[in-house]
């Protein structure tokens, strides 16, 4: 339970990094494709969370999951 803080921090870093360019991605490819791309990236991150064995792999998977979330939110709004 004490590892949730670092995991959420890594997810936040991924979200902030993608948040910096999410509006450009959605503007370039359109809202529907932005949502699909965000869902694909988030699904990839969730799939990686299921299969990882090492802690560093889990942190990478959570960062990938975090990068998909801003694309979904920006494309919906």
Image (spheres, grey):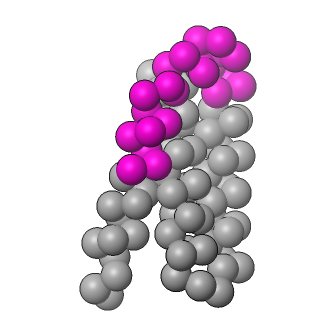
Question: Is 45 situated left or right of 73 in this image?
Answer: right
Q: Is residue 24 above or below residue 51?
A: above
Q: Nearer the viewer, residue 72 or 8?
A: 8
Magenta residues (range): 13-34
Question: Is 67 situated left or right of 5 in this image?
Answer: right
The answer to whether any part of residue 58 appears in the image is: yes
- The spot of residue 72 in percent (x, y) is 54, 36
Q: Is residue 24 above or below residue 39?
A: above
Magenta-drawn stretch, dominant element (helix, strand or loop): helix
- The spot of residue 35 in percent (x, y) is 63, 32
Question: Is 66 situated left or right of 3 in this image?
Answer: right
Q: Is residue 33 above or below residue 47?
A: above
Which residue does the image show at 50% across and 69% down from the upper left? 59
Please identify the quarter of the rendering in which residue 3 is found. Answer: bottom left
Q: Is residue 55 above or below residue 68?
A: below
- The spot of residue 61 in percent (x, y) is 59, 65
Which residue does the image show at 70% across and 16% down from the upper left? 29
Which residue does the image show at 50% across and 25% down from the upper left? 21
């Amino acid at each position: 339970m004490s590892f949730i803080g670092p995991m959420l921090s890594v997810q936040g870093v991924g979200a902030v990094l993608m948040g910096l360019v999410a509006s450009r991605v959605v503007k370039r490819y359109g809202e529907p494709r932005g949502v699909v791309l965000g869902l694909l990236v988030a699904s990839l991150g969730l799939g990686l969370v299921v299969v990882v064995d090492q802690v560093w792999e889990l942190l990478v998977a959570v960062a990938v999951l975090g990068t998909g979330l801003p694309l979904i939110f920006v494309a919906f709004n």
